[in-house]
Amino acid sequence: MIQHGIRFTIKPGVPHEDVEEALDSLRNQGRVIPSVLSFTVGRDIGGDYEWGALFVIEDLAGYAEYMVHPAHLHTDRVGLPHVEKFSSFDITDDADPQIGEKIARIHQRRYDTMPDIRQLVSDLGEYSGSAAPGPHGD
């Protein structure tokens, strides 16, 4: 099982409608991506971020499906331009000692094959997490 989480803060001055569109898109991806078993989208309490989401995914194959699913890509495209800082993380009970590297490769393949997504992530003011350093190659 992999629990994929994101935490993010919106840039100052972003219209409420744009924030709601991004949050609605996150909820939609939880509903329509077949590999998502359950999800939560809402306020991030007790941290340095405003919003968060958690998606429970069965396995690495499902994780790969999730990362390139059109609903997830739509969320990236409508949401990331409004994000000031972003963090992703993964929690797993998979005993494979290489699981972290495999997850990072899934993210890197996405960046390598989807230049617009790579650019959106590169344009974030602050990015950390399971796929970091991300498309920067740092």
Image: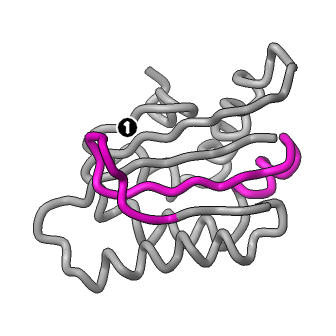
Residue 60 lies in the magenta stretch? yes
- Indicate whether residue 9 is drawn in magenta: no
Q: Nearer the viewer, residue 23 or 123?
A: 23
Q: Is residue 69 left or right of residue 59?
A: left
Q: Is residue 101 above or below residue 27?
A: above
Name the residue tied to disc 1: 127
In the rendered structure, the answer to whether residue 62 lies left or right of residue 103 reads right
Residue 31 placement (x, y as % from top left): 70, 76
- Give the residue drawn at x 84%, y 28%: 94
> In the rendered view of the protein, which quadrant contains the C terminus?
top left
Task: Tell me the residue at 30%/41% (across/down).
Answer: 47
Q: What residue do we see at 72% from left, 65% from top?
A: 69
Q: Residues within 10 Å of mark 1 (few under 14, many from 20)?
A: some
Q: Is residue 130 above or below residue 36?
A: above
The residue at the far top in this view is: 97
Residue lying at the far front of the rendered structure? 46
Residue drawn at (29%, 38%) of the image: 126
Segment colored magenta: 41-67
